[in-house]
Image (cartoon, helix red, strand yellow):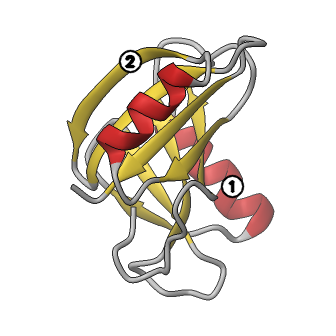
Amino acid sequence: MSESAPHRHHAIDYVELTVTDLAVAKRFYADAFDWQFNDYGPEYAGIRSPQGDVAAEVGGLRLDEEVRAGGPLVLLYSADLDRSVQAVKEAGGQVVNGPYEFPGGRRFHFTDPSGNELGAWAEQ
């Protein structure tokens, strides 16, 4: 997740697609939509911004054994991840994963009261 793109606190910032074959998914999206990628190893590829800025990303492809229920994972940006964790809990949401470290910073996943899973990330 890019440091060069402007991020807004608690705005939708990134969409992550779970894929079962990273190479096939990259080829599909490149062929169908001319998407380009930043590679982060065998299990993740960032989707570059359509403006062509190599550093700016709008989403990612994450390798997993199966596609996650509910479709793509929507990620919010947080200027203060720990405060966002607390806000989710206080508002009646449930933290289901994290916070944890990843190459772009830290993030956590949560469900809203209806069961929708989202994530939030911060650069630190």
Q: Secondary structure at mark 2?
A: strand
Mark 1 and 2 residues: CB-CB less than 8 Å, in contact?
Answer: no
The label shown at residue 69 is none
Q: Is residue 70 above or below residue 103?
A: above
Q: Residue 82: horizontal and vertical position, in percent?
A: 30, 39
Q: Residue 10: horizontal and vertical position, in percent?
A: 57, 54
Q: Which residue shows up at 74% across the image and 27% down it?
A: 71
Q: Is residue 117 above or below residue 2?
A: above
* For residue 70, side relative to residue 80 (left or right): right
Q: Which of 91 and 111 lies nearest the eye of the viewer?
A: 91
Q: Which of 29 and 111 lies nearest the eye of the viewer?
A: 111
Q: Amino acid at mark 2?
A: Asn
Name, please, the residue furthest toward the front. Answer: 90
Q: Residue 124: horizontal and vertical position, in percent?
A: 21, 55
Q: Residue 25: horizontal and vertical position, in percent?
A: 60, 42
Q: Earlier in the sequence, mark 1 or mark 2?
A: 1
The label shown at residue 97 is 2
Q: Which residue shows up at 52% across the image and 43% down it?
A: 61
Q: Which residue shows up at 24% across the image and 31% down it?
A: 100
Q: Is residue 37 above or below residue 109?
A: below
Q: Quadrant of the N terminus?
A: bottom left
Q: Amino acid at mark 1?
A: Tyr
The residues bearing labels 1 and 2 have C-alpha atoms spaced at a distance of 28 Å
Report if residue 20 is visible in the image.
no
The label shown at residue 29 is 1
